[in-house]
Image (tube, rainbow, N blue to C red):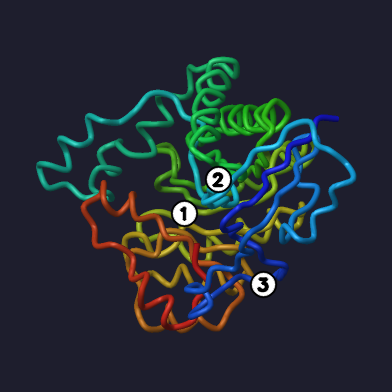
Amino acid sequence: MSSLLLSNIKTLAGIYNGKDAIRGRSLSTLNAISNAYLLIEGGEVAGFGEMKELDGKNIPDKIIDATGKMVLPAWCDSHTHLVYAGSREEEFVDKIKGLNYAEIALHGGGILNSANKLINESEDQLFNAAYGRLNEAAILGTGSIEIKSGYGLTPESEIKMLRVIKKLKERSSLNIRSTFLGAHTYPIAYVSDHQQYIRLIIDEMLPVIAKEKLADYIDVFCENGFFSNEETDQICRAGMQYGLKPRIHANQLSASGAVQAGIGLNAVSVDHLEVMDEEAINSLSNSSTIGTLLPTAAFFLRMPYQPARELIDRDCAIA
């Protein structure tokens, strides 16, 4: 087993032994060790601490003198859509013309556009493209990553995406978590019959996902014009019966009550949060649910950024 020692580290940051999310004023405190060492064996952290605590009896295979340098933990990217086919740059023209996210979706753009591109892609094609993106993320410092389905919207395509994510888990050294997002939007055929599509998710998709162990989480785009709070609850509770933990796309386009719906499910996270009212902020502050902020989504949609400072000051747990 190969070993590596980083010695004389000026600042070894990210030292946190607690299990609860850091929130509020605690976010301004960098938990770190000065004049530290970090020992890695077989690609995993085997020990760390102050240099004076280093046991010099076992000589590692390689030593790097990190004098004057900082060592940070790998990034954790907790909301991604890494598996997809093609891109949607043509929708920038729609945005320039003044169409918003919901209006683009009504014309078959957005999620439906991505679903149409993905349907004819094979698992191998999707895997090869996603594996390249995953390696790029690793080079930039990502060590843990969540990857969603959601561009399938049929049993066949959603399962295909999740199988690709499972293969990524098997092939990559990164810590990967898989999220089933079959409830990303309604396919055109089910726009007037939401329950029929929900039954498809519950009766046809979830049993296969559970049998093949394809997902760790279940996610729903809870928003006006997409899935209602009640539909979100129905879908998530069905997933929870199979051991999937809920997380919610919430309050991206409106203060729809999605944050409160997610908290009512004890969701791991509520994500986006571009539009937050007093009730949503108060609910998040008094819960263990983490609010995941996605500023690049707001940037590309030309929306106001999430109220990060207010959420921090109100003692919300955010990522």
Residues marked 2 and 1 touching at CB (< 8 Å): yes
Q: Is residue 304 visible?
A: yes
Q: Is residue 159 above or below residue 276?
A: above
Comes first in the chain, label 2 or label 1: 2
Disc 3 element = loop
Q: Is residue 117 above or below residue 67?
A: above
Q: Is residue 9 above or below residue 109?
A: below
Q: Which residue is mark 1?
A: 221
Which of the 4 image quarters holds residue 134?
top right
Which of the 4 image quarters holds residue 156?
top right
Disc 1 residue type (three-letter): Phe
**Quadrant of the image for the N terminus?**
top right
Disc assigned to residue 20: 3
Disc 3 residue type (three-letter): Asp
**Frontmost residue, 169 versus 309:** 309
Q: On the picture, is 264 further left or further right than 228?
A: right
Q: Residue at x 49, y 29 (%)?
A: 136
**Frontmost residue, 88 versus 104:** 88
Q: Residues within 10 Å of mark 2 (few under 14, many from 20)?
A: many
